[in-house]
Image (spheres, rainbow, N blue to C red):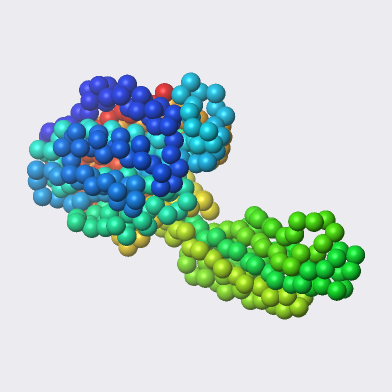
Amino acid sequence: MTAVDFTAQVEALRETMIARRRDLHQHPEIAFEEVRTAGIVARTLSALGLEVRTGVGKTGVVALLEGAKEGPTVLVRADMDALPIQEDTGAEYASQAPNRMHACGHDGHTSIALAVAEMLSGQRDSLAGRVKFVFQPAEEIGRGAQAMVDDGALLDPRPDVSLGLHLLNSLPYGTLGIADGAVMAGASIFRVRIVGKGSHAASPHQGLDPVVCAAQIIGAFQTIVSRSLDPLETLVISVTKINAGEAYNIIPQTAEIAGTVRAFSRQVRDLAFERMAAIASGYAGSFGCTAELSFDHLTIPVVNHAQTAARVRAQFSGIDGVTAIDQTARTMGSEDVSLFMDDIPRGAGRDADRLLRAPSPSFHLRRARFDIGRAPADERRCQLRPAEGLIRCRTRVSFTGSMATVGWSSAAVPMTMCARRHSTVRLPTVAWR
């Protein structure tokens, strides 16, 4: 059996990875403004000899690493954008940009994917297939993945499997969440504009009050979950914004409410908007007002293929540092990585510690270490071991494609891999501090 040991490469790259992540953290860029970040990514990948495309989806970067042998195409995706949040961590490498912060760990995602590219680029001769690196903008607003897909990120070549990682937190430390079916909700935003008739507040009978109408619509929206939806389904309708009027003594002409809908299936999402439209129209009519509902679907659900998820659970079971595998772990949060995964069998997992829920002005990726050990290739195993007490965020590893068809020769992608039979693969330790 042959083996690939990345330990020496990781040790050599350790300080570079730490410095790179801290640099990105100090210079965060929000959606579709990731010019500096994309430049660093493109220069790093070009220096490795990869075929690099820039400006994909406006500020995205795509790079292709060709192996010496025939095999599948594996997509490795990392998002790059920050949030419009004022950092409050007190870290020595805190954001230098006012009201800009990597509060969701995308600086870590970018640095991890660059480290993967650096390590695998040295294994071209033994790599069966190719690795397609996708550095995505604008995940935080749910627009970046679609922009990249529209610009051909999934073409020439089309991936057989897609891998994605996200740093979050909710499960107990050491617990890996890999559930069948939907694991992240699709997200939509909605607005309802209600038009009535303004009047003096002392003479409400002379007007048609859109504020009272809006209040009734908000309450009625909550009955959709309890009275229109199958109790075994899951749906969230949250009204998060109300705008109406400027003066305390004037009933305004218009009112607007807005919010988000989260669902694990498009059928449930469509039911929600059908009922919301009927409720808004009906209540508005009863008050003599009119109502207009508009909506925008930002992301689709991230759905795990059951067979792939089962294979991933088998790969992670019994690994040091994984104290439990939660097969029910789901979140109504959303991620547009689903657009890189929509039409291929896939699986997703999480590993987490309870600390701060991202995004937060105090979210702090203090240090994360992923220690990957030896695994016999003919068992199709991959190992992920967070060092005790160091990781402070949930890690989601997302797969698409049939794991059985992925054939690595004697190289591997850190954190997720499948190797060709009759070889043994040793994967690296990646540390942040």
Q: Quadrant of residue 408?
A: top left
Q: Position of residue 23 (x, y in %)?
A: 39, 28
Q: How many marks?
A: 0
Q: Nearer the viewer, residue 154 or 272?
A: 154
* Residue at position x 37%, y 57% in the image: 146
Q: Quadrant of residue 411?
A: top left
**Does residue 35 show up?**
yes
Quick check: 301 above or below 16?
Answer: below
Does 223 sit left or right of 313 as displayed?
right
Does 29 sit left or right of 234 as displayed?
left
Quick check: 282 above or below 23?
Answer: below
Q: Nearer the viewer, residue 50 or 255?
A: 255
* Residue at position x 23%, y 37% in the image: 45
Q: Which residue is farthest right?
A: 202
* Residue at position x 48%, y 29% in the image: 95
* Residue at position x 42%, y 54% in the image: 143
Q: Position of residue 184 (x, y in %)?
A: 47, 53
Q: Position of residue 283 (x, y in %)?
A: 72, 74
Quick check: 182 above or below 271?
Answer: above
Does 311 sit left or right of 228 as displayed?
left
Q: Quadrant of the N terminus?
A: top left
Q: Quadrant of the C terminus?
A: top left
**Does residue 172 show up?**
no
Q: Position of residue 320 (x, y in %)?
A: 37, 31
Q: Quadrant of residue 112?
A: top left
